Amino acid sequence: MIETTLNEPAAPPPRFDTLPLDPRLLKAVAESGYMAMTPIQAKAIPIVLAGRDVMGAAQTGTGKTAAFTLPLLQRMMRHESASVSPARHPVRALVLAPTRELADQVAANVKKYAQHTLLRSLVVFGGVDMKPQTEELRKGVEVLIATPGRLLDHIESKVAVLNQVEYVVLDEADRMLDIGFLPDLQRILSYLPKERQTLLFSATFSPEIRRLANSYLQDPVTVEVARPNATATNVEQRFYSVTDDDKRAVVRQLLRQRELTQAIVFVNSKIGAARLARSFERDGLKTQALHGDKSQDERLKALAAFKAGEVELLVATDVAARGLDIADLPGVFNFDVPFNAEDYIHRIGRTGRAGASGLAVTLVTRDDMRMIGEIERLIKKKIEIEPIEMEDDRPRRPRRRSFDEERDGPPLEAAASRSEPRAEGRGADSRPPARRVPAADPFFDKPYEPSGSGAAVWEKGAGVKGEGAGKDAAPVAPARVGLSPNIRPKKKVASLLGGGHA
């Protein structure tokens, strides 16, 4: 009997309609254009529906937001109420995010998935007026998305009451620890009931994250769909060796060569983002800057213009490294190598999202090698730094004339072109060659004279114990032999006390 082995095709990814979700939630998912689940969604959603605490690790852009939003909305459907009374709409799910942009992104997803239900949601963050947020909180919401600082403001003003919270989500918790939110997190969690379901999702799991999980999660299930701290496989990563002066030209060149219609350019400082954005504007590129010193209204407008395709380049600090879900973003540039290796993973995760391909370019100078080594250790992959051939498209400055040329007049070519026309019948080689006449200074044409002669003349003329000079003879001005006329001769002056010579 002959056995044959057939290569069976890979199993298709599971679909959302196979999950025990409310039809209204499935309708919202279908209207969003999603049919099949990503690996993190397929693994995490059933565990969250079962009520277990979860630590979810996945690369950015793989649908972590839906992985915790959909099961939490499903579990809260039993609290759905058409009543207008705020008491019927207490906060039951709290989502904490490190940045305003990420909080706003999560809130948009929650609102989209809950649009056919009676569950209410609200996002609160700093940089904007608290009064509208306070009014909405007093009306009652089931899902509250917040940044830690602004949430504490509402807690202290007695507007945000969290004693009925059943579900807590820490989104990008590693970033919250990086920027010093741990004391705020501990204060917020102290206001919550002890019995709750806690979910922690992040692209990177540092030792600090694991300690936090051990403190606030109860017997969590770890869900990892890729090697921890791995980069997305559908993002082409290139590292180019450049100098600081060539960085801007390299970005322009790669935008042309790769035909990138849009890109995010990451820098390490706020002032660097503002200056670089102005420079790209002068180069003719439609550019906006995004950093922490801008008001929230300016940041939201810049993001809206970028998502609408009205802006070609978004020059940003790491406030844009997380929470920006921009469909089909073709490229990301690390104009500055990030100080924190984990930020590299989050930066390049802005491109190649939802299965699309992307390009991530990092510009490396000689001073960046230590940080490149840290990125290598984090992603456990050897980084090849390539040279790049620069196109000679930079404007050339006219050659600066030397000091001799400035002193001696126009160059020979210019002088020849302005000279009188040649006499008729005179050959081209009959003109004597032009000769530069060096400037003459009479001082340097004089023969050398020792300084002793000047001293002798002074002594003889002044009559200071000189031969033939009387006691009361008046001093005679010295002969200034070989001295500059700007040097004044010494004079005898009377002392203020007791006479004598100065």
Image (cartoon, rainbow, N blue to C red):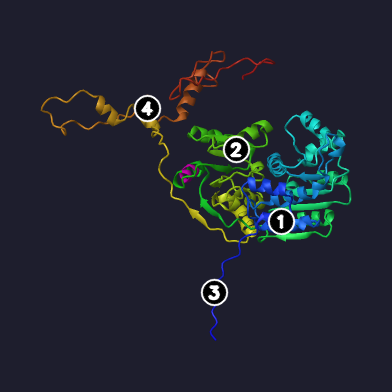
Q: Which residue is mark 1?
A: 19
Residue 315 image position (x, y, % from top left): 58, 39
Q: Which corner quadrant of the image does residue 28 belong to?
A: top right
**As drawn, which residue projects farthest toward the front?**
23
The answer to whether the residue labelled 3 contacts the one labelled 1, judged by CB atoms less than 8 Å apart, is no
Seen at 75% across and 60% down, the residue is 222
Q: Which residue is mark 2?
A: 273
Query: Which of disc 4 and disc 2 is earlier in sequence?
Result: 2
Mark 4 or mark 3, earlier in chain: 3
Q: Nearer the viewer, residue 83 or 213?
A: 83
Residue matched to label 4? 407
Q: Amino acid at mark 2?
A: Ala
Q: Is residue 404 above or below residue 36?
A: above
Query: Element type at marker 3?
Result: loop
Which label sits on residue 290? Answer: none
Measured in 3D between alpha carbons, the distance from the residue under mark 2 to the one under mark 3, in whole angstroms, is 56 Å
Q: Earlier in the sequence, mark 3 or mark 1?
A: 3
**Magenta-drawn segment:** 251-255
The x and y percentages for residue 206 are: 73, 56
